[in-house]
Image (cartoon, helix red, strand yellow):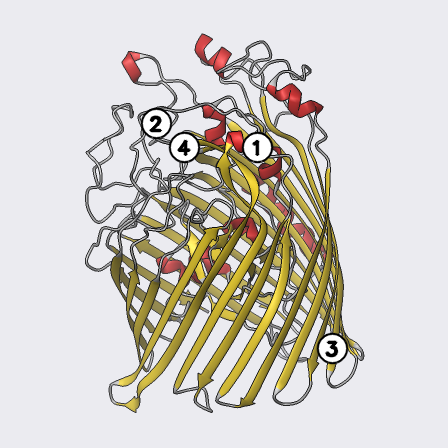
Amino acid sequence: MPTFKLKRNILSRVLPTSILAPCLLSVASFYAMAEEVILPSVEVHANTVQENNNAAVNTSDTASLLENEAGVSLYRAGGVSSLPAIHGLADDRVRVKVDGMDLISSCANHMNPPLSYIDPSNVENTQVFAGISPVSVGGDSIAGAILVNSAAPKFTKAGEDLLINAELGTFYRSNNNARGVNLSTSIANSQAYMRYTGSTVEANNYKAGKRFKAKNAAAMNKASHILNGDEVGSSYYESRNHALAVGVKLDNHLVEFKVGLQDIPSQGFANQRMDMTGNESEQYNLSYQGQFDWGVLAARTYHERTRHAMNFGEDKQYWYGGMMGMPKAPGMPMDTEGKTSGLHLQGDINLSQRDTLRIGAEYQRYRLDDYWRASPAGLMMATMMGPNTFWNVNNGERDKYDVFAEWDAQWNAQWFTQLGLRSSTVKMDAGKVQGYNNMMMGMMGYGDPNNPMSIPGAFNAADRSNTDNNIDMTAQAKFTPNASQSYQAGYAIKTRSPNVYERYVWANNNTMVMNMNNLYGDGNGYVGNLNLKPETAHTLSATASWNDAAQQDWSLKITPHFTYVDDYIDAVACGKVGRMCMMRPDGFVNLSLDNQSARLYGVDIAGKKLLTEGNGLGSFTATGALNYVRGKNRDSGDDLYNIMPLNAKFALEHQLGHWTNMVQAKFVARKDDVQVVRKELKTAGYGLLNLYSSYEWKYARFDLGIENVFDKYYANPLGGAYLGQGATMGVDVIHGVAVPGMGRSVNVGLTLKY
């Protein structure tokens, strides 16, 4: 059987070639929406981040750039790997595109989500389509869409000198001793350009606002590695990113070629039993955009390859090492290789001054191998974790074929409508699997993979191929009676097929293995379900917006929303789907997945008011936002998992010349509505105060931030269960503690520009 090995020196080997080849080919550049998107979207610029802060100063997690946006919350995971949620729906239920690439997480714990592949310093703008997203933005999702783009190319006018730009930034964050550097440089003339961006960051474990456990509370932890009571184990990370873009412009035609490389040597996960011990990714992205008399033509092809490794990090016990004087074992190596390739073709046809027809086709090919090599650790490991390679997913396949059409009509100055239809065919399959040991049966064994009476044999004998034919439809209307108000309403049917892990994870007789297949950070074990059907969401949403005519003084936006999901994929007891899972004594549970029905509803409110302008003290602006969402499983009566409780954010922004300041307060209500079947933890309400300040010169910028000023202790409502230290595969876990948020941190950054 094939084996793969992560190579730490991938950047030194691949980067010179990736730089030279595009230069020799002179292939190239530009990705942007050809038309102005009239539908509701939120735009975030990474160099301002709604707070006039340099993004990289306060976060290395690109998903965090969205946390102040209406309707968006974050599943907190690793330091660069949070998962965005829109109106209570997260992960694969949100369509995420990075520079037009529709990427997929290749990990049994989803440690490498799409937004982890671009550094915040490389983000120019992000659009969030909450609830109802146009069918042209993407399918195979039910929550909405997030589009993240790096900088668009800039060209000079004919006859002008070369345009050369460079930016160098560095930062330090006191709480977790995070330090990093980012660099961006570009050169362009009137027809071609080249841009390089690179970043590196390294951080230690962060500290909570107070002690939440006894010092070194996990007794099985290595005696030489003591964690203080306020230290959040497995929250460290190290990440390096490189991106190169080259482009050519000829009249109204633009071509761009981008190469992205990532190396994450280590990233701890405080809500998982394993840590990331390596993640290397390569992305190749070629796009074309041309303007014609009839409209716009856009095309893209891309390929992404990820090699991912997990094991017990330095804060987690290496199986039985250190226990009763026994030697330290080498852990439980887990390797994953994922490959995503895609094609996208879209034409925007100007039928008339009123009507635009947008038609397109997409293809996505995904392959996944998830295998766990035998652990060479003596007799115990040879039987429990050997002598075979354990195949969690063998040659998982997920191919998607889409066509769509979208009609925009600007009936007059007041009325705009959009109708969209997308047809999607998702074909899935997986190869045969095997356990660690073909001979053993029962608690720690799996049996002969060729015997249909054994667990792997039953999976291998089953029909694993599946084809889903999905339909998406959207209808929206916007009424703008004057410059001071607008009203919008819409209805959408959106469909998502299960991902590879939800369908094909097969082992249900071993808690150790089930723990490794956890997309949720709740500490439980999971087994997949071959019989899962696609989720279908029916969403109603309306938005009322009011503002002054010049849109400078004040604004208020209110968006109520309602979603009903047929065949919602949720956690269930194993017996409900005919699986026999082990009982466990550690306070967690082993579960499977099944189709049920769910209902979600809520409201987003956002507003601002200019308080003063033009006096000697500068301008002052007050902003505020409130988000509420409620989710219920209609079949079981249980609450939905990881729903953000009522929360609000208020800020006072000050601008005086080149000096910008902000005082921000965040309030989160107590989370009492938790999912019983997963034993989800309740969290207390809290409030945080953050201070930000920056001063900008012509060629430099200085940023200062103090987050969680009063060093408040709080548990993140979407942070999951704390599994950050100790022998996480045994009863040594500190049970019943939610992952704490970060205590006070002083963040400083300096950016130099040319």
Q: Is residue 374 above or below residue 358?
A: above
Q: Residue at x 54, y 38 (%)?
A: 593
Disc with the residue nearer the chain's start (4 vs 1): 4
| Residue 567: x %, y % from top left | 60, 48
Disc with the residue nearer the chain's start (4 vs 2): 4
Q: Given contact means CB atoms under 8 Å apart, are the residues at marks 2 and 3 in contact?
A: no
**Mark 2 Cα shell of 10 Å, populated few (<14), some (14-19), many (≥20):** some
Cα distance, mark 4 to mark 2?
13 Å
Disc with the residue nearer the chain's start (3 vs 1): 3
Report which residue position mark 3 lands on. Answer: 356
Disc with the residue nearer the chain's start (3 vs 4): 4
Question: What kind of residue is marked 4?
Answer: Arg
Q: Judging from the image, what secondary structure is the residue with disc 3 in?
A: strand
Residue 265 versus residue 86: which sits nearer the camera?
A: 86
Report which residue position mark 2 lands on. Answer: 586
Disc with the residue nearer the chain's start (2 vs 3): 3
Can residue 40 be seen here? The reply is yes
Question: What kind of residue is marked 1?
Answer: Val
Q: Is residue 91 above or below residue 480?
A: above
| Residue 519: x %, y % from top left | 49, 40
